[in-house]
Image: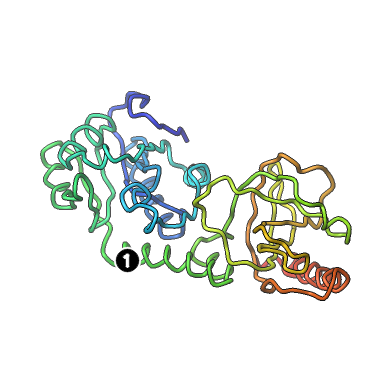
Amino acid sequence: MELISDLNQLPSFEGSVVTDGMFDGVHLGHQQILKKLVQQSQELKLPSVVLTYWPHPRHVLAGNQDRVALLSSLDEKAEMIAALGIDFMVVIPFTLDFSQMSHSRFVEEVLVQALRTRHLIIGYDHRFGQNRLGNIHSLKTAGVQYGFDITEIGKEEVEDIAVSSTKIRNSLSQFQPEAAQHFLGRPYTIRGRVVEGDKRGRTIGFPTANLEVDELLKLIPKDGVYATRCRVEGIWYPAMSNLGFRPTVDGKKHSIETHLLDFQGDLYGKTIDLAFCAAIREEMKFDGLEELKMQLEADRLKCLQILQEGKV
């Protein structure tokens, strides 16, 4: 898949099959739309194009009070979309100036002139352009004028997609990663760089990688201990992870710590992916490091059992 961040960088092609949206998290509902896109592009023998935006429009238009927590960074979204066989992902920088573009100008300059849209797959309630005046009806009118067809995604499917996104966020905030996985079709994942911590874990036999998340607006699951998988340089390792403030050692800074269960080597400075497979227990305070060590050993065995069973 080719990632395009400037419409002027688009290669010249006779036409394309396009869908438009944020696709945050690329969950199972999104995947159904993207599979339709690929199927239609194969039938028409035209490239498939996902048109999306960055940053999230609500982060630009709604201010700090209404910012939605992201289920995927731009890089993560691109990787998941590419895995579905899409040819191009076009990312339009969403700015205040762009939000003022009229819906008719958007159709003409983006859909027609830049993307040469021949077939558009879009939701029944899609709104776009200045003051969100553009809708499915204006798109159908434009389709007749400019010669592109439209596949309309029905009300039930669109609402299922919105419900899934909400349920994923709620599940992760309520210590239910397994429920989030049900809607995503895979464990929820965060990405970041391993930074130095206080190295306290290694003194009790549980050295940890401290993760600094790349995307500041990424949704972080509820604090607690999780069975996780950790991808290091393309290889997934079983792991257990703790999110929280480490009350037993009077931690004052929130941290994301991961103990890899079958790994030898130096992780400092590496970018890793952390997949949340199952909830083990919520964060708690223990009476000293020895009691903490005993609990961590029990947690380790439980994580190994869950991950070895292969259910997540």
Q: Nearer the viewer, residue 276 or 115?
A: 276
Residue 217, placed above or below residue 234: below
Q: Residue at x 79, y 74 (%)?
A: 286
- Residue that numbered label 1 is attached to: 159
> Residue 139 location in percent, x, y?
17, 47
Q: Residue at x 85, y 68 (%)?
A: 289
Query: Which quadrant of the structure image shows residue 54?
Result: top left
Q: Nearer the viewer, residue 187 or 190?
A: 190
Q: What is the number of callouts on the image?
A: 1
> Residue 51 location in percent, x, y?
35, 41
Q: Is residue 153 left or right of residue 272?
A: left
> Residue 87 location in percent, x, y?
42, 36
Residue 269, placed above or below residue 8: below
Q: Secondary structure at mark 1?
A: helix
> Residue 193 location in percent, x, y?
66, 44
Please identify the quadrant where the C terminus is shown.
Answer: bottom right
Q: Amino acid at mark 1?
A: Glu
Q: Is residue 34 left or right of residue 192?
A: left
Query: Which quadrant of the structure image shows residue 160?
Result: bottom left
Q: Nearer the viewer, residue 226 or 58?
A: 58
Residue 42, placed above or below residue 299: above
